[in-house]
Structures are given as C-alpha cells and as structure tokens.
Image (cartoon, rainbow, N blue to C red):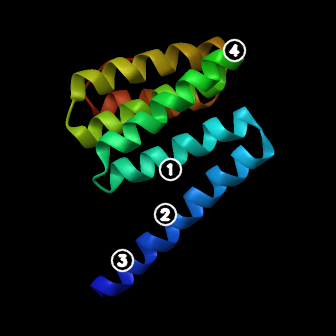
Amino acid sequence: MLDDNAGAYDAARRDYERALELARQLGDPSAEAIELCNLGLFLCAHDELSRGYQMIQDALAISERLGDIYAAGKAIEFLGRADTYRGDIPAAIAHFREALRRFEQVQSPDAEIVRAALRRLGAES
C-alpha cells in the first residue's frame, strides 16, 4: 500500500511540475501564477513547506504585477491554506481575511469558500 501512495504522489507531482513547465513555455504569466499556486500548495501538503510557500509567494508577485485582483486573491488564499499546514493559524487568518477582501472587490463566489475557512478557524469574516 505504501508503494501505491508513493507512486500516486510521484505521478501527481510530475503532473503539477509539467503544468508549470508548459505555462512557462507558453510565456503566459497568468497560467504560470496558477500553476505555481497549485504546485506550491501540493508541496506544502506533502511537507515541503518552505519550497511550496515560496512558490505561492512567487505566484502572488506575478498576479500583483499583472494587476489581477482575483488571481492575487487566490494566491493569498493559498498562502492561508499553506499557513494552516505550517500550524501558523494567526497568519492563516490574516491571509484569509485579505483574500476575502480581494474576492469581495471583484465579486467572486470564492469569497464564500474563504468565509468557510475563517469559520473553521474560529475567526469571523
């Protein structure tokens, strides 16, 4: 069973890495930011917290440079999720609140997902 889990992990990681590589090859910074978030959160969920967190921060920088409020909100939401993996609940709450602010600014339905995360953490949105 352990080998099956390792195989699934390796396959998923390769898929995330390939998606990031393709986004970079296309020269599409929006797609690159999305894939950095996806791979970064995957790594955080699998105990590569430092590398994963940095990838999400890189995605946020790209999204902010592009002026993409929604994508920046997603990156901030992912930083909040990564904070929970790191056990830093105050940072997670701060990130979720900022993500919520951005999602409300663009009237994204993702605001509800973030409100639910805040409720789970015992923080009011």
For this rendering, which residue is in front, 75 or 23?
23
| 26 relative to 101 in the view: left or right | right
Q: Amino acid at mark 4?
A: Gly
Q: Circle 1 is placed at which residue position?
A: 39
The residue that mark 4 highlights is: 67
Crowding around mark 4 (Cα neighbors within 10 Å: few <14, some 14 to 19, many 20+) is few
Instruction: Mark 1: give few (<14), some (14-19) or many (20+) Cα within 10 Å.
Output: many
Question: Marks 4 and 3: CB-CB under 8 Å?
Answer: no
Residue 115 percent across, percent down from the top left? 44, 27
Amino acid of disc 2:
Arg
Residue at far left of view = 87
* First of labels 4, 3 by sequence position: 3
| Secondary structure of the residue carrying numbered label 1 | helix
Residue at position x 43%, y 46% from top?
Answer: 41
Element type at mark 3: helix
Q: Which mark is residue 6?
A: 3
- Mark 3 or mark 2, which has the lower sequence index? 3
- Rate crowding at label 3 as few (under 14), some (14 to 19) or many (20 or more) other CA atoms within 10 Å: few
